[in-house]
């Protein structure tokens, strides 16, 4: 029996899936216990129960000055920025991906330009974005767009180029215009790839969002993390980091579910 042919059953699969998370939790708990035993005032690795208590407090207690629960306020602010940035990138990436993939003139004009632009580290542009667009919401959204759009364009245009040429030739034989070919032949093939590309862009998008909020913001998950770091409030920082991870995981699962429901025929290849 070769290892490549051994498939875990359902229960074993769930156990294997949970094993890395359990291992990380146990390692953290042991490390925290060792540090707190040596120094009860240690702030670097707070006990798991303290992190849990902090999470409950942050999610339920209102701020004394504003009366708002800052945890949910930060979450809403960050999700708005992320959704707007990813949404713009997806829409623009779809348009340019179709154009570059279908139109030889557009491909000659833009393919190498997009390739070069994609090599620029987006975080290096952050000071320029703040100077040009100011310290408000626009610069944060633009950073997410700048960081994710080139990848989306390159990925989607490549998918259009992979559309079987026979389909395009048959459509032209039947008298279809370039617009009809784009909408009726290429676009249906592209939509599953778009969702997959957006899923892959979520990680970098969160990175750019947190970086922008850390530098210039008055609300947001990244803003709160960098605000409390000066007090070494690791219990608060860990709560926010875990929450960001949960949000990213939920978004990824929702996109995967959307892809399965809307394009079940494409799931085997994704």
Image (spheres, rainbow, N blue to C red):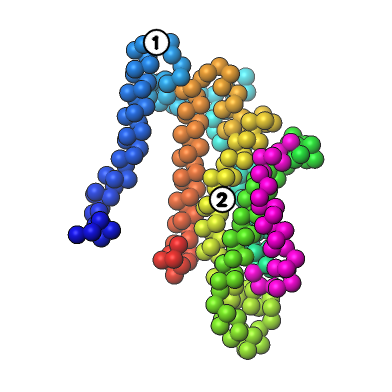
Q: Quadrant of residue 20?
A: top left
Can residue 247 be seen here? The reply is yes
Magenta stretch encompasses residue 90:
no
| Residue at (63% x, 31% y) in the render | 214
| Residue at (69% x, 31% y) in the render | 216
Can residue 88 be seen here? The reply is no
Q: Judge by depth and name the residue closer to the eye, 83 or 233.
A: 233
Query: What residue span does the magenta drawing correspond to?
Result: 101-127
- In-image side of 148 versus 237 (left or right): right
Residue 127 placement (x, y as % from top left):
74, 36
Residue on which disc 1 sits: 39
Name the element at disc 1. Answer: loop
- Mark identifier at residue 182: none
| Residue at (46% x, 46% y) in the render | 250
The residue lying furthest to the right in this view is 132
- Mark identifier at residue 201: 2
Q: Earlier in the sequence, mark 2 or mark 1?
A: 1
Q: Judge by depth and name the residue closer to the eye, 192 or 7.
A: 7
Residue 60 placement (x, y as % from top left):
48, 27
Question: Which quarter of the rendering shows the N terminus?
Answer: bottom left
| Main secondary structure of the magenta stretch | helix
Q: Residues within 10 Å of mark 1 (few under 14, many from 20)?
A: few
| Residue at (34% x, 18% y) in the render | 33
Question: Compared with residue 244, is residue 164 higher up or lower down, i.e. above or below?
Answer: below
- In-image side of 11 versus 95 (left or right): left
Magenta stretch encompasses residue 113:
yes
């Amino acid at each position: 029996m070769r290892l490549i042919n051994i498939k875990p059953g359902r229960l074993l699969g769930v156990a294997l899936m949970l094993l890395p998370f359990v291992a990380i939790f146990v390692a953290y708990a042991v490390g925290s216990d060792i540090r707190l035993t040596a120094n009860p005032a240690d702030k670097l690795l707070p006990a798991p129960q303290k992190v849990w208590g902090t999470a409950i407090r942050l999610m339920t207690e209102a701020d004394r000055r504003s009366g708002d629960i800052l945890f949910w306020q930060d979450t809403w602010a960050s999700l708005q920025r992320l959704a707007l940035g990813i949404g713009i990138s997806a829409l623009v990436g779809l348009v340019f991906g179709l154009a570059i993939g279908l139109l030889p003139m557009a491909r000659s004009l833009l393919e190498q330009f997009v390739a070069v632009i994609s090599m620029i580290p987006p975080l290096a542009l952050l000071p320029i974005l703040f100077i040009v667009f100011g310290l408000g919401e626009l610069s944060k959204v633009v950073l997410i767009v700048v960081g994710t759009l080139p990848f989306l364009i390159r990925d989607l245009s490549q998918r259009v180029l992979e559309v079987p040429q026979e389909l395009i030739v048959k459509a032209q034989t039947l008298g279809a215009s370039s617009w009809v070919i784009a909408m009726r032949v290429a676009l249906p093939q592209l939509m599953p790839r778009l969702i997959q590309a957006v899923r892959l862009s979520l990680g970098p998008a969160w990175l750019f969002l947190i970086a922008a909020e850390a530098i210039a913001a008055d609300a947001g998950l990244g803003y709160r993390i960098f605000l409390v770091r000066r007090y070494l409030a690791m219990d608060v920082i860990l709560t926010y980091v875990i929450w960001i991870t949960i949000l990213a995981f939920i978004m990824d699962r929702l996109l995967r579910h959307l892809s399965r429901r809307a394009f079940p025929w494409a799931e085997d290849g994704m």
